[in-house]
Image (cartoon, grey):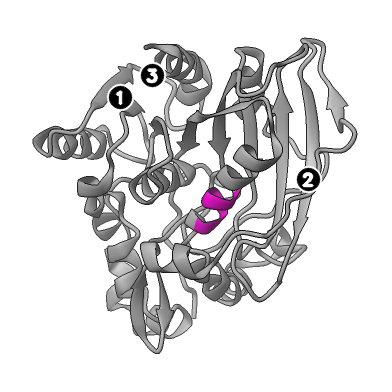
């Protein structure tokens, strides 16, 4: 039988949740965050992985804590702006990789790409912490056929879910920034994400009060409308236990009430993956709840390129605004 997973977002790796299954019952992310404590100690930055022409340095950090506890086996890539920096002098952005069907996580490897999505922030004066998500697919998954991929995602799903669909990973990235990066101002740590990672950014903002601002590019705002077909497929419900609650509790539109930081929603009008109407409905919901939201659109660029240009430049200007 051919099983078609809902492909959300751009097409490679990443993102999210707000619960896990414990005895068959959904456990809210707030509970998951409290139970999955961050590592007691984070590793130092070490030597730069790379120095860019702009003077920005990147570092690769491997967190190796208790493998039983969600979020304690993580990899992070840190970008530090050029020059010397006083303590607590720089703003910071947290960014997860994007592109998954929102049912599994993503690992990071040394010398991975993603610089188009991360380097501009560092060149604009932000420390950037890019972080992995628990529940990554097994090595070689990109060569799997459709049925094999469904099985691989099914195996990764419980670990991803136990991490709060990446919210635990985002919280630990924030902890790392505050405890190990002396140049980071703990009062100016924002989360940014595109597509699936945009939904994760919204979930992180809803569950982590230390987030200063949140930027969501072409996010999956309403998972119940986007992934609802999975809940009526008995095979999918077997492969992904608790999928009904998972979809409901990881949908950003269901967490508007607890998003208390300013939010920038950026969307292309010609987005062929997430309709512009989804963004407009989400923004309307934020406004109805009296949330601080800025809504920016661009006429073209589709799902991905619109984020690269002009989205990132728009976000940098907004993040720097008083």
Report crowding for label 1: few under 14, some 14 to 19, many 20 or more residues within 10 A (C-alpha). some
Confirm whether residue 76 shows in the render. yes
**Which residue is more in the foreground, 265 or 319?**
319
- Disc 2 designates what residue? 61
**Would residue 147 be found to the left or right of residue 284 on screen?**
right
Residue 97 seen: no
Under tag 2, what secondary structure?
strand
Q: Nearer the viewer, mark 3 or mark 2?
A: 2
Q: Secondary structure at mark 3?
A: loop
Q: In the figure, is residue 318 to the left or right of 308?
A: left
Residue 269: numbered disc: 1
Q: Secondary structure at mark 1?
A: loop
Chain part drawn in magenta: 168-172
Q: Which quadrant of the view contains residue 183? A: top right
Cα–Cα gap, marks 1 and 3? 6 Å
Q: CA distance from mark 1 to mark 2?
A: 37 Å
Q: Which residue is mark 3?
A: 300
For the point 61% across and 18% down, which residue is it?
89
Q: Nearer the viewer, residue 243 or 128?
A: 128
């Amino acid at each position: 039988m051919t099983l078609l997973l809902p492909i959300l977002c751009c097409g490679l790796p990443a993102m999210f949740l707000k619960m896990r299954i414990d005895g068959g019952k959904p456990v809210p992310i707030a509970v998951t965050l409290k139970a999955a404590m961050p590592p007691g100690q984070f590793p130092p930055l070490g030597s730069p992985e790379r120095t860019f022409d702009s003077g920005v340095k990147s570092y690769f950090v491997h967190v190796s804590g208790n493998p039983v506890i969600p979020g304690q086996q993580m990899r992070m890539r840190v970008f530090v702006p050029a020059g010397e920096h006083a303590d607590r002098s720089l703003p910071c952005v947290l960014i997860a990789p994007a592109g998954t069907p929102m049912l599994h996580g993503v690992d990071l490897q040394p010398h991975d790409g993603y610089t188009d999505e991360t380097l501009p922030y560092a060149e604009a004066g932000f420390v950037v912490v890019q972080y992995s998500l628990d529940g990554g697919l097994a090595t070689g998954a990109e060569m799997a056929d459709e049925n094999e991929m469904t099985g691989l995602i099914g195996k990764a799903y419980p670990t991803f879910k136990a991490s709060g669909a990446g919210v635990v990973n985002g919280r630990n990235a924030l902890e790392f920034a505050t405890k190990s990066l002396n140049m980071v101002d703990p009062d100016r740590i924002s989360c940014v994400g595109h597509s699936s990672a945009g939904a994760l950014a919204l979930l992180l903002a809803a569950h982590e009060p230390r987030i200063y601002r949140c930027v969501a590019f072409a996010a999956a705002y309403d998972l119940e409308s986007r992934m609802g077909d999975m809940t009526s497929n008995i095979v999918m419900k077997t492969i992904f236990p608790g999928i009904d609650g998972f979809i409901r509790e990881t949908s950003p539109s269901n967490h508007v009430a607890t998003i208390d930081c300013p939010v920038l929603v950026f969307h292309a009008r010609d987005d062929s993956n997430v309709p512009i109407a989804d963004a407009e409905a989400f923004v309307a919901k934020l406004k109805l709840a009296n949330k601080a939201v800025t809504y920016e659109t661009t006429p073209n660029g589709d799902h991905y390129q619109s984020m690269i240009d002009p989205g990132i430049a728009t976000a940098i200007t907004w993040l720097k605004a008083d």
